[in-house]
Image (tube, rainbow, N blue to C red):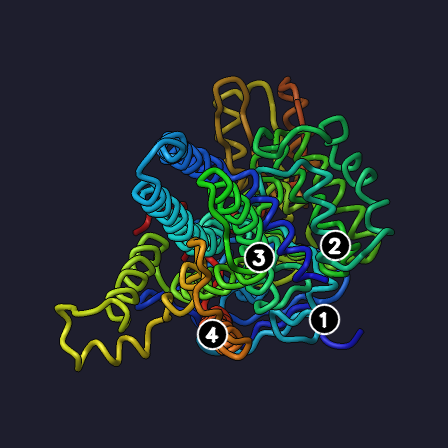
Amino acid sequence: MNIRVIALNTFGGFLRDRLIILFCALFVCVILLMMTPLLAARTLSAANNTQQVQAMVLGLMSGIMALASGFGSLLAAWAATDTIASEMRSGTILAVMARPVRRWEFLLGKYLGVQLLMVVYIAAMLLLSYLLAQLGGERIHSSWWLLLLYPLVRYAVYSAIAMLLVTVLHSIVTIAIVLVISVLANVVAPSAGHSMIPEVIRTPLYVLLPSTNLLSETRLLSLTQAPLNPSSWLSHLTALAYGLDYALVCFLLAVWVFHYRGLTRD
Amino acid sequence: MTGPAIEFRNVSKSFRTIPALSGVSFEVAHGEVCAFLGPNGAGKTTSMNVLMGFLYADSGEVLVLGHLPGDVRAKRQIGFLPENFAFYKHLNAPELLRFHVQLAGLGVQGDVLIPELLRKVKLNGYEDLKIGKYSRGMVQRLGIAQALLSDPQLLILDEPTSGLDPAGRKEVRDLIMSLKAAGKTIFLSSHLLAEVEQTCDRVIIIDRGQVVRAGRLDELLGRDDRVEIVVDHLPTTMEQLLTDRGVFVARDMQVVRLTVGAASKRDVAEMLWEAGCDVISLNRVRSTLEDLFLKLVGDGSQP
């Protein structure tokens, strides 16, 4: 009951957060700007060089989707950081924790509030993906639930990492570390090809850091007319379970740290 | 109910190397109104935060209503007003109270209480205004309303009259008196010593993280058997006579104050009348909490 109340209040707070509204508005503007060449390319495709235009359209679409997906990771980390840091900074946490609320309930409520925000974000992202595909005259060959679950799990991982870090660090340091983690995770992934990082560091980092490549929906977001080899159920389950496990470990660590820390600004 | 409502036994707490509490021990009995006094930085808020389970003591033992601080069984019976009550700016007063009703697990019966509580703290009529637009005093009233929400057995109020105007302070004082009459235990901190004197049964004075005095207010202030007589003027010859009889004379701008022993007040008053002095007032001299406080912790000018 308490968890649900805290989650809904957190979500309500996000929807009224001026910073989030501003970022989303800016983001929509960028997307709209990027869509302009897409619409122009579609007009061209009616004339000649069909294959060339199609390649351009696909490039644009994947660019927009990658941007939306990356922004989501940042949003998840920022929302998780801010929701805890602002409660501590303003002191609102004291009135909440004076109620019969356990510390883990508070943290879980906050975490679920962030996930609610991310569900809304992913739904908007899905809508955008289908809209782009429609505009580009292409078809998305993946199930919608996969496109929903993969980013949701990835965002759950990032928000759990952020929540763990913010229980001990300043919010700006937290965001900076999450950004470094997300960049490093991509650099050390085997799919990133040859990198400057020596193998002896690269392998442990790849094991330690969340595999965002594995959890990336772009892996299965085949936009070409010929569908890619579909992944098996087991493959999806393994990838999603890996992400959930990673998020759970980070969240449990956050609960443990949060349990032993003071709740005041002293 | 067995045992005290609040029990602090040899509690110490440091922030890094700075000690905030050093072996603090005190008790607050059920049904008592107890004031927790001390200068800024004395450790009052730290003690309250330890009491609520927001901070962990480095050593010592704390029990609240027979439970450890932070235990939900204790928190169900506690109403807490933090110092500088903070709020979710995006909510209005009924929404915030509803949020607290839900957290307290009061359900529908709690929802019914909301309009009544808002009336009680004089916030009715502001239901649609976002809390972010409230004045400092209104926020404090709302904080008091949320503390009273679950009809708690124990109220822990950190500076309840902070930010309130004189009328608001009187309302809080009346509220505390009515809660006291209802048998609630109240543990409050305040800098307004005159108000504390009017409402509290017991006082705990803390300074630099240590309890310097604790006890019932009447015991701490003691009984003074001196009387102050105020007259409009006093001839010099009369002054010499009275001084010889052990009367303390202090001349103000417009009046003369004479402090005499209670036993000789009648004689002195009659002497004054006969000498043609107009006796303006005759009152028992009483030590105030402020006197005691300043005596114990100084005037704050010490480093």
* Sequence order check, earlier mark of 3 and 4: 3
Q: Which residue position is annotated with label 2? A: B102
From the image, tell me which residue sits under label 4: A239
Q: Secondary structure at mark 2?
A: helix
In space, the residues marked 3 and 1 are separated at their CA atoms by: 46 Å
- Looking at the picture, which amino acid does disc 3 mark? Trp
Relative to A68, is B177 on the left or the right? right
Callout 3: residue from which chain? A
Q: Nearer the viewer, mark 1 or mark 4?
A: 4
User: Is circle 3 on the same chain as circle 2?
Assistant: no
Q: Residue at x 50, y 50 (%)?
A: A139
Cα distance in 3D space between marks 2 and 1: 16 Å
Which chain does the residue under circle 2 lie in?
B
The residue carrying pointer 2 sits among few (fewer than 14), some (14 to 19) or many (20 or more) residues within 10 Å by Cα, namely many
Residue that label 3 marks: A144
> In the image, what residue type sits under mark 2?
Gln
Secondary structure under tag 1 reads helix
Mark identifier at residue B73: 1
Q: CA distance from mark 1 to mark 4?
A: 42 Å
